[in-house]
Amino acid sequence: MTGPAPLPAGGRLTVRERCGARAAVAVARVLAALPPHRMCRLLERIRRGARPATAAEALRARHAVVTVSPHCAGDGCLPRSLATALLCRARGHWPQWCSGVRTAPFRTHAWVAVDGRPVGEPAETAFYHRVLSVP
């Protein structure tokens, strides 16, 4: 199932997209509370049967998530990345979900990627070493 083209900056979401994004954010908050190994195992099950996401599909899902959730639009990288991946999966595709660390200064971050490149993330995401990944 191919979705519509990515939204331009400030683009409006349909009612269906808003509802889907809100549901994905709600599920992502539950997943974010799980221990990392259980969260990854569950994500691996969820992604089964999905085709790889394109960068445009992942960017559209990310836009929907940050539009409906102020927490995900801010510093909530874990629920944002999980909700983005879940929304993509609801549409039949799956981006690579990643979580990593950097040491100078020490920080953790979670994001989605397509073809190994972070989607909708700042350039500094390249400095994070991937620790967890669900391709």
Image: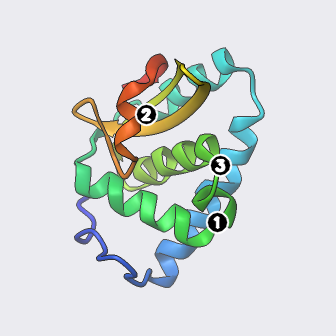
Question: Which tag is nearer the camera, tag 1 or tag 3?
Answer: 3
Q: Amino acid at mark 1?
A: Ser
Q: Is residue 100 above or below residue 57?
A: above
Between marks 3 and 2, how big is the CA–CA gap? 22 Å
Query: Residue 11 in the image: x percent, y percent?
Result: 37, 82
Q: Nearer the viewer, residue 88 or 10?
A: 10
The mark nearer the N terminus, 2 or 1, is 2
The reply to whether callout 1 and callout 3 are in contact (CB within 8 Å) is yes
Q: Which residue is mark 3?
A: 76
- For the point 47% across and 38% down, the residue is 111
Dot 3: what SS?
A: loop
Q: Which residue is mark 1?
A: 69
Query: Residue 32 in the image: x percent, y percent?
Result: 70, 36
Question: Which tag is nearer the camera, tag 2 or tag 1?
Answer: 1
The reply to whether callout 3 and callout 2 are in contact (CB within 8 Å) is no
Q: Amino acid at mark 3?
A: Gly
Q: Which residue is mark 2?
A: 47
- For the point 49% across and 24% down, the residue is 44
Query: Residue 41 in the image: x percent, y percent?
Result: 58, 19
Q: Amino acid at mark 2?
A: Arg
Quarter location, residue 61: bottom left
